[in-house]
Structures are given as structure tokens and as C-alpha cells.
Image: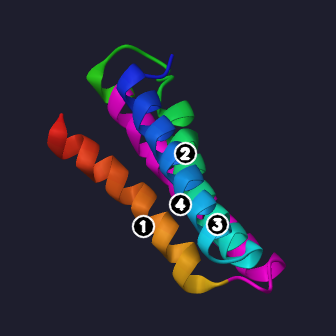
Amino acid sequence: MINRKILRIIGLQASLTLLIVLGFLVFSDRVSAVSSALGGSIGFLTGLAYALRSSSPRGVTPRHWLQAQYAGERFKFVMTVILFSATFALYRPLRLPEFFLTYIATLLVYFAALLLD
């Protein structure tokens, strides 16, 4: 079972991604919006991958919980590398400013939630 706070953060990341993408659709063009969507998606999908992997430890001891967190972080890192590589390889018209703006915005949601909690 994934913690509600984690799900809320992932939901905020996805919502912010959608808001930024809509902004690019209105004020720029489709390539900017797609680039933004790809960056934001990597941000919140890897967070979801972490949450899914780390939320099911194999035991109840603190060591098992810690191992689950490490496994979640490893999985998130691997997914991030794979998704970045796939994006750079498969989407040639990628606009890096829009891509990284939205990716970084999703990361900032996570850190802001930690500070405000």
C-alpha cells in the first residue's frame, strides 16, 4: 500500500506537468508541449516507480524497510536513465529548455512538499 502523502505528491507532480503542458500548448507550439510532457512524465513516473517498489518490504523489521527504500531508489535511478535515454533517442524534435523546465518543476514539487510538511 502506497502512503497517501506520497500519492498526493505524485498527483501534484502530474497536475503541475499538465498545467505547464497546457501553457505551452496555448502560448507556444505542439513540439514545446510534447517536450514538456516528456520531461514532466519522467519526473512523476519515476517517483511512482519508487513508491511502488519501496512500499512493499519483505519483512517488518527496520532493516527490511531500509532495504525496500534502497531498492526503490535503485529502481527509480534505473528508470530515470532508461526514460531519459529513450526520450533523447526516439524524440528528435525535443526542445531541451521545455523538457528540463518541466522535469525540474516536478522535482521541486517533491522538495517543497518535504519542506511544507
Residue beneath disc 1:
104
* Residue drawn at the location 64% of the way across and 66% of the way down: 26
The residue lying furthest to the front in this view is 26
Quadrant placement of the C terminus: top left
Q: Secondary structure at mark 1?
A: helix
**Can you say whether 27 is above or below 116 in the image?**
below
Residue beneath disc 2:
14
* Residue drawn at the location 58% of the way across and 84% of the way down: 96
Residue beneath disc 3:
26
Q: Main secondary structure of the magenta part?
A: helix
Give the foreground label among 4 and 2: 4
Where are the magenta residues, as a range? 65-94
Give the foreground label among 3 and 4: 3
Give the distance between the C-alpha atoms of the residues marked 1 and 3, in whole angstroms. 21 Å
Q: Is residue 70 magenta?
A: yes
Where does the image place residue 37, in percent across and percent down from the top left? Answer: 65, 62
Residue 20, which numbered label?
4
Q: Secondary structure at mark 4?
A: helix
Q: Residues within 10 Å of mark 3 (few under 14, many from 20)?
A: few
Query: Is the Cβ of the residue at disc 4 closer than 8 Å to that at disc 2?
Result: no
Residue 109 appears anywhere in the view: yes
Q: Please state which amino acid type lies under the numbered disc 3.
A: Val
Count up the numbered dots: 4
From the viewer's perspective, is 86 left or right of 101? right
N-term mark: 3 or 4: 4
Give the distance between the C-alpha atoms of the residues marked 4 and 1, in whole angstroms. 12 Å
Give the foreground label among 3 and 2: 3
Q: Please state which amino acid type lies under the numbered disc 1.
A: Ile
N-term mark: 4 or 1: 4
